[in-house]
Image (tube, helix red, strand yellow):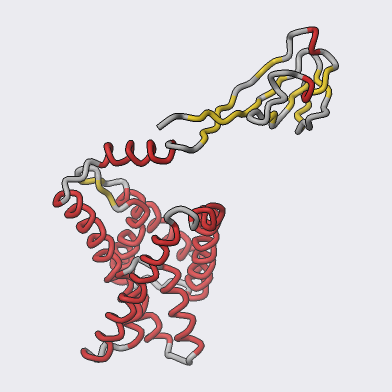
Amino acid sequence: MSDIALTVSVLALVAVVGLWIGNIKVRGVGFGIGGVLFGGIIVGHFVDQAGVTLSGDMLHFIQEFGLILFVYTIGIQVGPGFFASLRVSGLRLNLFAVLIVIMGGLVTAILHKIFAIPLPVVLGIFSGAVTNTPALGAGQQILRDLGTPVDLVDQMGMSYAMAYPFGICGILLTMWLMRLIFRVNVEAEAQKHESSLANGHSLIQTMNIRVENPNLNNMAIQDVPILNSDKIICSRLKRDDTLMVPSPGTIIQAGDLLPPRRPIYRPA
């Protein structure tokens, strides 16, 4: 088997073992997708013990490509609501996140100075402690640009893998202690949060309306008493097998299917 095929097979094994570990839950708490890292540590140990040689170029490509996909998917998921969240509580939460990063950076710098921890190692510890995978990739790239030897750059990934489990366990332990100390009822808090979002805000209700009244045949949407309200929007119109976006002047016919949406206001 070639080095490339062997590398891909080992990575597939890491994914399988990691997903299996991530699905293991203790009292409803599990590592989730973070289990892949533990799978990598376990498989990597046995691969090293067996003396298996993997393709360095293939590992580098998968690392960079995987990091690109990771950042892209996070951006696609968070990006659309990022600026909208700034108007509510997003600004406060983002400032809190920046404060966490700054404090983590200060602690990292202090550890580096006091205990003389090598820079690649302490950068890996920082990335793993805050569970920040993009920081790992950026740090390794900076070290390469500075001409750092490859074996020292690899130390950053090793220290990241060692610190990451403690970062996850620390977060889980902190959340569990806060829930225990402050006696937080998660379900009650979730219902309270949903009710606060609905209070004073409009919710969208959707429905499908089929035109069966012959008096509405060949009439514009804006001339229909029910549909000309500013609180109702006809988002789509389906006629036979054709789906279109109607305008107020669109002529409706018998058999048309209209899915209007209207906001429902709930009093406090």
Specify whether 179 is left or right of 14. left
Residue 56, position as x, y percentages in the image: 47, 75
Name the image quarter holding residue 171.
Answer: bottom left
Residue at coordinates 34% horizontally, 87% vertically from top-left?
A: 119
Note whether residue 121 is visible: yes
Q: From the image, which quarter does the C terminus lie in?
A: top left
Specify whether 117 is left or right of 71. left
Judged from this view, the residue extending furthest toward the left is 181
Residue 206 vs 19, above or below: the answer is above
Residue 126, position as x, y percentages in the image: 32, 75
Instruction: Out of 82 and 35, give the one closest to the viewer.
Output: 82
Residue at coordinates 36% horizontally, 50% vertically from top-left?
A: 19
Specify whether 255 is left or right of 18. right
Residue 246, position as x, y percentages in the image: 77, 31
Instruction: Out of 250 and 5, give the one closest to the viewer.
Output: 250
Q: How many marks?
A: 0
Residue 9 vs 260, above or below: the answer is below
Specify whether 123 is left or right of 247. left
Note whether residue 158 is visible: no
Residue at coordinates 68% horizontally, 26% vertically from top-left?
A: 229
Judged from this view, the residue extending furthest toward the top is 214
Residue at coordinates 78% horizontally, 30% vertically from top-left?
A: 248
Residue 14, position as x, y percentages in the image: 38, 58
